[in-house]
Image: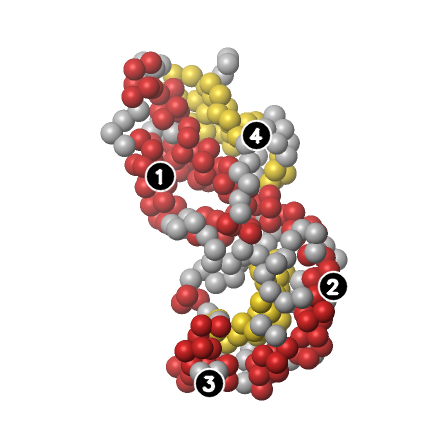
Amino acid sequence: MHGLLLERVVRRALEEDLGHGDLTTTAICPPDEKGPARILCKEEAILSGIEVVEMVYRLLDPRVELQALAQDGDRITPGEVVVRLSGPLASILQGERTALNFLQLLSGIATRTARYVELVRGFPVRIVDTRKTLPGLRALQKYAVRVGGGGNHRFGLSDGVLIKENHIAVAGGLKEAVRRARSMLPLLTKVEVEVQDLEQVKEALKAEADAILLDNMRIEDIKGAVALVDGRMLVEVSGNITEANIRQVAATGVDIISLGTLTKDVEAVDFSLLVEGL
């Protein structure tokens, strides 16, 4: 992850949580009291977010020392300690919620991604994310997708051309939308078109798009689209794809399966921070 971006995101999260101070910890915990603590996972997961936890305490109080006992991408088990901390207990407690929030979110994304990647094992298809991310956290969420073995689609609108149904409506047709895009783009920029049915697949082929995104198509239509394309362009599929049907989708011969669920339907992984002795 980019250091300056990570610092900005973490600093904002700390400001949000600490506000004008931690009333509870200030009242109960002497400022000079030091001790050890540990962060442990309560369920099986793919770990992601260790660097973010380190950044939380680096910004909050550099006197807090961290020892990572596991690394991003590791499969961790219930009860496993992933980080040990030592230093001012007040600072450790003040950073607890922010550190755990990032850890549970990113590990949840990595775990979900790894599950989908495993489901399509054996097929020559890539699992990728979408732009359906939490505002301000896109880079971190997409990092967690990579940790889980997935790939990243566009980070933002400036990263590639994807002509969607509203663009087609504005242009007055798919072919015209592709023409307008080509007329404004550098020569090597790829153009992808979202299509809803097999007729639009044929239009995209005639318009010489570089890739198509099959949106919310039935399995039979996906197979038909792959047959029509016959290797002439990249085929991506998205929409209504679940753990129950993803292998069936992968078996159609598509190149990419993009899943908004990886980042928008996150099941947080359960972590706890405990002061040693509790």
Disc 1 target residue: 13
Question: In front here: 240 or 4?
Answer: 240
Q: Amino acid at mark 3?
A: Glu
Looking at the rendered structure, the secondary structure element under dot 3 is: helix
Disc 3 target residue: 176
Is residue 43 positioned above or below 200 on the image? Answer: above
Question: In front here: 242 or 114?
Answer: 242
Looking at the rendered structure, the secondary structure element under dot 2 is: loop
Looking at the rendered structure, the secondary structure element under dot 4 is: strand
Q: Earlier in the sequence, mark 4 or mark 1?
A: 1
Report the residue at 46% width, 85% height from top. 176
Disc 4 target residue: 41
Disc 2 target residue: 251
x, y percentage for residue 45?
61, 38
Q: Amino acid at mark 1?
A: Ala
3D distance between C-alphas at marks 1 and 3: 45 Å
Report the residue at 72% width, 69% height from top. 220
Is residue 244 positioned above or below 160 on the image? Answer: above
Confirm or deny contact between disc 4 and disc 3 (CB under 8 A). no
Looking at the rendered structure, the secondary structure element under dot 1 is: helix
Report the residue at 49% width, 52% height from top. 142
Q: Amino acid at mark 2?
A: Ala
Mark 4 nearby-residue class (10 Å; few <14, some 14–19, many ≥20): many
3D distance between C-alphas at marks 4 and 3: 53 Å
Mark 3 nearby-residue class (10 Å; few <14, some 14–19, many ≥20): some
Q: Earlier in the sequence, mark 3 or mark 2?
A: 3
Mark 1 nearby-residue class (10 Å; few <14, some 14–19, many ≥20): some
Closer mark to the observer between disc 1 and disc 2: 2
